Amino acid sequence: MSRPVLSQETPDNQLPPTEKDGLAAESTPLSSTKSASSRLSDFLKNFTSNRKALAGLIIIGIFLLIAIFGPIFLRQDPNAFSSDALQSPSSAHWLGTTNLGQDVFTQVIDGTRASILWGLATALIATFLSVVIGIATGYLEGVGADVLVMVINVFLVLPGLPLIVLVVAYSPVRGPLTVALVLAFTNWAYQARVLRAQTLSLKARDFVVAARASGESTWKILFWEILPNEIAIVVSGFIGTLIYVIGAAAGVEFLGLSDVTTIDWGTILFWAQNNSALLQGAWWWFAAPGICLAGLGAGLVLLNFSIDEIADPRLRSEIHRKPRIKRWSLIPVGKVQPAP
């Protein structure tokens, strides 16, 4: 049977089935692009409509602005001594002073940069190790993968905080870098285990099998096919690691196992405890860094919860279906409220 000749004026609804299929195939990239853009717009819409995400971003943004621009506008040396020893908060000293007359507000602002900077660096190192080792052990097979799995299991059963205290206490070099490296190399195993389990599930999917059959390299499959489908887990793990390392670093410095001459939230707490600030009634000395630690941790937790809600459609649908509780209204005496 001869193929029908089509003119330029032929409408689409009069095309033969074979011609309509060909045009649909040619327009597939456009539809997929539209689908990707719609998914991105849906994600942004869900993210901006999530109250936990907005609250977490506002809190984290405030601390980041303080860390970046705060020390620039400080006109006073945070280590400068004065005769105003143990002064309560006032217009001259917004957060009071230490026993040596040092301004607590200046120390807290200056220490915000160090606390957040070293926390981010430590969390990035730990997340990088967990991503590389977790995805590799989940996809690869052989003796090397088995050895890495054994290493993960060993680090999982090691007591984290006692090991950190022991290594930092006997380290010949003390300082934020030592604390950051110890925390990074002791807090990657759990997230690597989670990513390994997810990779074991993904490597049997059709798109991974197709990529392997088309001859793509192993590393391209790992980081171009599998990793993009685990971004939500990676981001959530990074935020959880960041929360832990900031608190653990402050705890190590509070014990005096780091360089106490540097200024950050942990060393401020160390000097407050070392000089009996609580017994002297100088509550402002330890309250300011403590509130900063709690506030930053709360912002990160809210952001982490919002990511879970946005990434999990079932959890997001449950939140949308959650009924609102009506407020109680006062009922006049002698009147009966009708049943709903």
Image: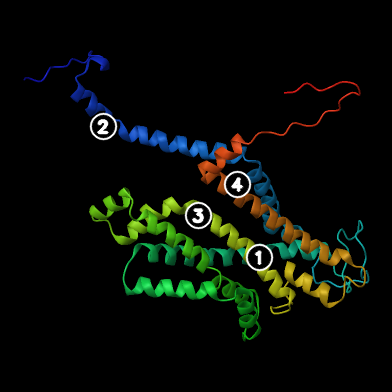
29 lies left or right of 36 = left
Q: In this figure, which residue is indicated by the disc labeled 4? A: 306
Residues at marks 2 and 1 touching, judged by CB atoms closer than 8 Å: no
Q: Residue furthest left?
A: 1
Disc on res. 25: 2
Q: Percent from the top left, x then y, of residue 289?
A: 77, 63
Asked if the residues shown at circle 3 and circle 4 are in contact, with their CB atoms under 8 angstroms apart, the answer is no
> Which numbered disc flags the more N-terminal residue, 4 or 1?
1
**Who comes first in sequence, dot 3 or dot 1?**
3
Q: How crowded is mark 3: few (under 14 residues within 10 Å), some or many (20 or more)?
A: some
Above or below 323: residue 116: below
Residue count near mark 2 (Cα–Cα under 10 Å), binned few <14, some 14–19, many ≥20: few
Q: Which of 8 and 265 is in front in this view?
A: 265
Residue 264 seen in the current view = no
Instruction: Say whether disc 2 or disc 3 marks the residue closer to the N-terminus.
Output: 2
Mark 1 closeness class: few <14, some 14–19, many ≥20 residues within 10 Å: many
Looking at the rendered structure, the kind of residue marked 4 is: Ser
- Screen quadrant of the N terminus: top left
In the image, what residue occupies the spot 52% across and 71% down?
156
From the top left corner, tell me how far across and down residue 16 is, in percent. Answer: 19, 19
Q: Which residue is drawn at 87% across and 58% down?
A: 94
List x then y, in percent, for residue 272.
Answer: 83, 72
Q: Quadrant of residue 237?
A: bottom right
Tell me the distance, in whole angstroms, between the alpha carbons under discs 2 and 3: 34 Å
Q: Which residue is drawn at 82% across and 74% down?
A: 273
Query: Which residue in the protein does label 1 denote?
Result: 246
Disc 3/disc 1 C-alpha distance (Å): 20 Å
Contact flag, marks 2 and 3 (Cβ < 8 Å): no
The answer to which quarter of the image holds residue 110 is bottom right
Of the numbered discs 3 and 4, the one sitting upstream in the chain is 3
**Residue annotated with mark 3:** 233
